[in-house]
């Protein structure tokens, strides 16, 4: 491969840090028997497959319990559900009874489901790695081969085609220097865990699985590259950057520009454990509580009281600060078992997010009632509660959400807002903001819908670049509407954690930025190093650019010199 011979593998970086260390490749899946005969006793073979699936499910459930309350634990629980899915077992049994060998039957059934997941796209496409990991573990048990994984004995850069939750849970994370994957994306399981742990990570690095064990590489997350046999200059650059980032973590002051213009710096969370970790940082609150993460393994709609207890724990963790809760963003690429829709030809444009109120209104109303109850349970010193609905498309839907929330008991100082993910809302932001207290831009979906590109298709990554001027224009239009209405407009998509983008967003009028807790120090430093006027100049320069690369370059050109090395530009 050209990238390998040139000594650099390009990919998508997660975080700002860099590290140098030896490669350790994660052991791949088991080999399928070349000439596996049809089972002499099909029913006995079916029973063996069912037993192997049950054993894998039991193992994943135990690992999920060990990581209870964390995002990893939730995703492991979802993987355990895959192993216990009766449809998967039934399809493998059909293949066995039709004459397919045990291992091939499991493999073929998994691949059929994987194809379906990939056609759905989004969250389901990113779960294909988890599904295939389940299949590999079952095949390994059936054929007596080692299960996939890696037993680290010394610090190393972990390299894999992709990492499943089971792979990650088996790693000694104290020995993981960084992570490199050939597949995955910036919102994949691997990227999320790396971001939470502050590990340098590069995903979609073509050629990564061709690296040899023991080969010394530099993982430069800020530039999205893996450098083979790094020289002393690069090693020194990465060491200086890490030291600078370590120093930035000591700054726990509220976010603001050099001349004192306040910009709230918030954390994204998905579980109570995420909240407790983020609350220990300098985050000024939560800008995005992804409540659907709590229910990935739920087969029935959660009871109001059970939800309320969880929400109350998060509100208590952030006492004196703010928590912005996103109501269930279920459907399409994030299906929940209790909220599944009938087959949709184009689920990304179907019943998802707040649109569940059209088909399952009680799920929406129960969650709102649970949030109202949680506010009372959390006590007087709890966090200030803000609630927003995802996938709002019209001013009418925004007004309906507010009325429904008020009826559910979310009154007396609870902020009610909407996610701006649909271009129609950005274009009509003035009217939408007339009916709500705030808005939050979900730049991942906004880019997907604006550019008509699935955000998980690697071949379309250039269209989904966060610097695309068309997307920036919609962000700027929404922020301007917020300034005019004197209502806050935040950003909680991937863009918020990019220090360069944070400067441009601030210049557009965005009032808060929500990101993984590990991204906060660099963003805080970027803001503190520039005045509001400088941020406004960066915003104008980015909006005037002809393409994404030009927009980013325009902001880089206006950076103060002292910020360049820390921001790795």
Image (tube, helix red, strand yellow):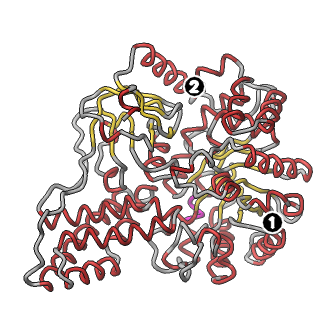
Q: Residue at x 41, y 55 (%)?
A: 72
* Residue 36 vs residue 89, the one in the foreground: 36
Residue 455 position by quadrant: bottom right
Kindly give the residue lying farthest to the right in the view shown. 484
Instruction: Pick the quarter of the image with the C terminus.
Output: top right
Q: Residue at x 27, y 28 (%)?
A: 215
* Residue 84 vs residue 227, the one in the foreground: 227
* Residue 151 vs residue 255, the one in the foreground: 151
Q: Position of residue 408 (x, y in %)?
A: 73, 77
Q: Which residue is mark 2?
A: 568
Residue span colored magenta:
310-314
Decide: marks 1, 2 in contact (CB < 8 A)? no
Query: Mark number for residue 242?
Result: none
Q: How many marks?
A: 2
The answer to whether residue 319 is visible is no
Q: Residue at x 28, y 65 (%)?
A: 135
Q: Position of residue 338 (x, y in %)?
A: 51, 79
Residue 331 position by quadrant: bottom right
Q: Which residue is mark 1?
A: 412
Answer few, some or many: residues within 10 Å of disc 1's Cα (few below 14, many 20 plus, some between 14 and 19). Answer: few
The answer to whether residue 259 is visible is yes
Give SS at disc 1.
loop
């Amino acid at each position: 491969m050209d990238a390998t011979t040139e000594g650099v593998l390009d990919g998508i970086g997660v975080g700002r840090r860099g590290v140098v260390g030896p490669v350790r490749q994660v052991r791949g899946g088991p080999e399928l028997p070349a000439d596996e005969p049809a089972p002499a006793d099909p029913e006995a073979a079916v029973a063996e497959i069912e037993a192997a699936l049950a054993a894998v499910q039991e193992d994943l459930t135990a690992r999920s319990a060990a990581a209870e309350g964390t995002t990893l634990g939730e995703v492991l629980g979802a993987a355990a559900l895959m192993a216990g899915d009766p449809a998967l077992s039934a399809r493998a049994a059909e293949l066995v009874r039709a004459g397919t060998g045990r291992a091939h039957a499991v493999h073929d059934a998994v691949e059929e489901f994987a194809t379906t997941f990939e056609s759905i796209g989004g969250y389901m496409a990113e779960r294909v790695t988890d599904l295939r990991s389940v299949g590999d573990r079952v095949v390994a048990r059936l054929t007596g081969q080692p299960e996939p994984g890696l037993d680290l004995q010394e610090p190393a850069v972990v390299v894999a085609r992709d990492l499943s939750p089971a792979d990650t849970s088996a790693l000694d994370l104290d020995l993981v220097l960084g992570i490199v994957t050939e597949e995955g994306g910036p919102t994949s399981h691997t990227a999320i865990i790396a971001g939470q742990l502050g590990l340098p990570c590069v995903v979609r690095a073509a050629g990564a699985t061709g690296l040899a064990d023991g080969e010394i590489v530099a993982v430069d997350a800020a530039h999205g590259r893996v450098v083979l046999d790094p020289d002393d200059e690069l090693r020194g650059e990465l060491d200086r950057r890490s030291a600078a980032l370590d120093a930035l973590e000591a700054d726990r002051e509220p976010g603001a520009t050099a001349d004192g213009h306040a910009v709230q710096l918030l954390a994204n969370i998905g579980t109570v454990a995420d909240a407790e970790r983020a609350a220990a940082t300098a985050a000024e609150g939560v800008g995005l509580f992804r409540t659907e993460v709590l229910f990935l393994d739920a087969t029935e709609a959660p009871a109001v009281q059970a939800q309320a207890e969880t929400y109350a724990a998060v509100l208590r963790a952030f006492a004196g600060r703010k928590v912005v809760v996103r109501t269930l963003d279920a459907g399409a690429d994030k299906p929940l078992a209790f909220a599944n829709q009938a087959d949709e030809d184009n689920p990304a444009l179907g019943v998802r997010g707040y649109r569940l109120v059209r088909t399952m209104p009680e799920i929406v109303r129960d969650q709102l009632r649970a949030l109202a109850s949680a506010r009372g349970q959390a006590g007087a010193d709890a966090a200030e509660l803000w609630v927003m609905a995802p996938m709002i498309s019209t001013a009418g839907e925004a007004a309906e959400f507010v009325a429904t929330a008020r009826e559910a008991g979310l009154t007396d100082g609870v902020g009610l807002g909407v996610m701006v993910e649909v271009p129609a809302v950005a274009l009509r932001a003035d009217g939408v903001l007339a009916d709500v207290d705030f808005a939050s831009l979900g730049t991942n979906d906004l880019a997907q819908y604006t550019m008509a590109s699935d955000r998980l298709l690697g071949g379309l990554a250039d269209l989904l670049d966060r610097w695309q001027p068309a997307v920036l224009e919609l962000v700027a239009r929404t922020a301007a509407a917020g300034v005019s209405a004197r209502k806050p407009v935040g950003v909680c998509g991937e863009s918020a954690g990019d220090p360069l983008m944070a400067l441009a967003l601030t210049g557009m009028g965005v009032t808060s930025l929500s990101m993984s807790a590990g991204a906060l120090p660099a963003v805080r430093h970027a803001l503190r190093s520039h005045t509001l006027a400088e941020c406004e100049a960066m915003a104008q320069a980015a909006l005037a650019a002809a393409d994404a690369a030009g927009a980013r370059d325009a902001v880089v050109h206006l950076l103060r010199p002292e910020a360049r090395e820390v921001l790795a530009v």
